[in-house]
Image (cartoon, rainbow, N blue to C red):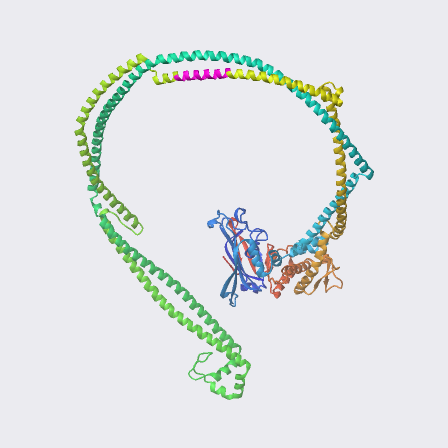
Amino acid sequence: MRITKLEFENLNSLKGKWSIDFTHPDYAKNHDIFVIHGPTGSGKTTLLDAITLALYGRTPRLEAINNGEGGNEIMTRGTGFCRASVTYSCKKGLFLSEFEQRRAGGKAQGNLQKTSFKITKIDGEKSDLGELFSSQEEVVASGSGGINFEKETQKIIQLDYKQFCRSIMLAQGEFSAFLESNARERAEILEKLTGTERYRAIGKKIAEKFSEIKKNFQFAKSQKEEIESLILSGEDEKKAAESEVQIEKSLSESEKNLSRLEKELSFFEEIEKLKKEGENISSGLTESDKKLSLAQENAASLKDELEGQQKDFENQQILWKKVRELDVKITSAQKTFTESENRKNSASNALSESEKKIAFLEEKISGLEKSLSEVEKYLSENENDAKISEAAAKIAALKNSFNQAKDSAASFQRQKTFLEEELSKVSLQKEEGALELEKIDETIKSFVASDALFIAKILQTQLKDGNPCPVCGSLYHSGENCDGGENPAETQEILGSEKALQIARESSNLTKKREEISSKINALGEKITSLEAEIKNAGENHSSQKENCQKILDEINETLSIWQKIATEENFESVLAELRLRFQAWNQKTEQQKNFNTEKSARIAEKNAVQENLASQKENLEKAAAEFEGEKNLLQKLLDERTALFGSKNVDQEESQKNQKILALRKNFERAEKDQNEAKEEKAALLAKKSQLEQLLSEKEAELANLLEKSDSKNLINKEEILAKRNELLLEKKDLNEKLIDLKTRLQANEQNKERAKKILADCQKLQEEYGTWEQMNKWAGTREGADLSVFVQSLAFNSLLALANKNLFGITKRYRVLQKEAASLEFEIQDIYFEKPRSVSNLSGGEKFLVSLSFALAISEFASRNVRVDSLFLDEGFGTLSGELLTEAINALKNLQKQGKMLGIITHVQDVINEIEQKIEVKPLALGHSVLIGSGIKS
């Protein structure tokens, strides 16, 4: 996989569009090794960020380019868009991989939109400079989301993100530390470089699992010992079972005695209840006598009051009749009074409205006369505005002509500009053709000069009369016949030689190419003449249309002179708009004049009609006022008579209240009679119940005496002694129940403990076997961090890595070879052909350590990419300790990588390294935290 071109926009400090073409000849010229240099923080590593961003949508410094609120840390601040694209070749062909992300509206403050990607396969032919001059493109993948992007790239180049980073970024600095570390430290470094951290994690998981199993096993053992201590012996279990039977027998006997005592107690309680009920009945009879006496007194009182109210009601009926007759007369008089009052008010309101309307119309007529005077004054002062409509139509037509002339002038100007640009291009092509023709002539001269005599002899045999010489162009050669005839055999030998054939072919090709270029130059000369004529014609047409524009503008200003306006190309529309407004105002004033006259006439007619009706309205008001006074006096006389007879009281209301009072008294009297009857019935019921209760009590006392005589309680003379005996038996029963429950619980727990003991024993045996297995695995894993397992695994990986490192070391220098001290270890030494015995790593010089660490770095790059060849590599620093001869030796070693077809970019700010390497990409800081790129193949 080889990167041929890198393009990006708005990444970190590198604002704007940038392109780096790695196929530029300067890179191959300088051994395909270049340095990326600039001050710390200027943006050197951004080039690597752009590559991984274009391929995987992520960078070594950012796990993922965030969407939404998370932000985009790689997008240049103050911009609303970033992108990166890489053109690369691999086994599957030539591909273009693109990544981009935008903010809403392309604004720096807009919300981040989703990232998008596209991978395009490019099939095409290349020029001698490596540039595609014809291609076909096929989009193989596109969409949004970093995970999908990474998967699609992995399908093409067969490397995931981590493998790609390990392959393209030479870890020389890591291997410098690797050389001077112990076995465990080397294992940690190899883990990071080979991506085999999982084995250390496996070792750690083994230690954690062993700790967990050990803890579980110890817990199971303690549980087994604990449960075994809780299980009863056989003899204790037998005694507990016998005690259970004895307690259950005692409980049965207690239940029988308690049942008998409960029955006896129920008789005592029932007799007490009957006695209590008899006392309640006696108390009820006393209360019933009181209630009956009170009810009889209340009924007699209510009867007397009811008879008095009924007699008073009959006396009031005569007065109420007289008052009702008077109320009918008053109602009729009030109606007549209200109607006369309404007629009087209506006549008064009509007269007032007419007087107001006359005043309003006089004011309105005065206002219309004033407005009419102002409008007529405006029309007189601006009488020329009536002509604006006609003038506007004329100006609009002239404006269209002006615009057409202006557009024609602009069109001719654009045509002239285009032709001038075309003339410049054609002239440049002609100059380039002339230069190429000079180069061919120089080549011919050089070619002829190198084998002049040999070529001359060949040409002499091919010269013909009348045709120019291909060397000097002459039509005559005086020595041709003489020289050709002196030695015909030698001439034939020259013509038949391989060298002659080669010279003939080259001569023919150069001559043919010269003729083609000469023909092309002549054609370009004719085209230049034609273009110059067209440019002249376009210029004349442009001038003509400009003059026409001015004539039209003069005619427009002549039309506008009546209004003292001058139109220019800039204010033309505003002048025309102002005239339209003036004409609109003129029309409005004319319409207002017409409307004011019409309204004035209507208002005068309306005023005259109202004045004619005013006299009859005054006469109606006087008549209505006289009728109103007569009706008012009659009504007042009737009201005074009623007040003297009954005041302001309402007859119906007084009669209703009287009726309600009589009804209430009648209802109360009926309720009192009912209460009297109920009291009599209640007393009779209580007397009957008392007799029945006395008989039942006598029967129960006889039955209790008979029961006590037959039972074991005959010596107990009262309820308290029987109750005490029952409570004694209840306590005894409770004690027996508690003992029985405790015994059953112990026996049940014993059975459960037996079952648990069986299960715990089985679990303990199983955990013991598992403990043994994980104990052995823990010994293999070593420390709690899994370091020993990691060292073992890395020693196996180290064998493969060592073979690759030696291959790369041999490609750089044949002097050294790395040897593993022992199988399955990370210890090694250096074989040097200048020494008999292997050398320790600690005895290597700085330059030698660099060569060894570089070979390991190249090896890890191959190891990470497996079967994928990666020909674009980058080295970040690593030269800090090298200088002078050692630095030169290291640079020469890196230049040898070109023999393997690899390109190497070194990122550094060390000046000695920058001076040693001719091909450079400079990252130069500017103001505001931005930087620019300078170097071969770079465009912005």
| Residue at the image point whose x is 55% and y is 83% from the top | 497
Quadrant of the rendered image containing residue 878: bottom right
Q: Is residue 121 above or below residue 262?
A: below
Indicate yes or no whether the magenta region holds residue 675: yes
Q: Is residue 36 visible?
A: yes
**What is the x, y in percent for residue 123?**
52, 65
Q: Is residue 250 above or below residue 321?
A: below
**What is the x, y in percent for residue 404?**
30, 57
Magenta span: chief secondary structure: helix
Which sits in the foreground, 188 or 738? 738
Quadrant placement of the N terminus: bottom right
Q: Which residues are magenta?
A: 659-676
Q: Is residue 118 visible?
A: no
Q: Is residue 215 above or below residue 629?
A: below
Side of 264 where 628 appears, left or right: left
| Residue at the image point whose x is 32% and y is 57% from the top | 407
Which sits in the foreground, 177 or 198? 198
**What is the x, y in percent for residue 793?**
71, 56
Indicate yes or no whether the magenta region holds residue 400: no
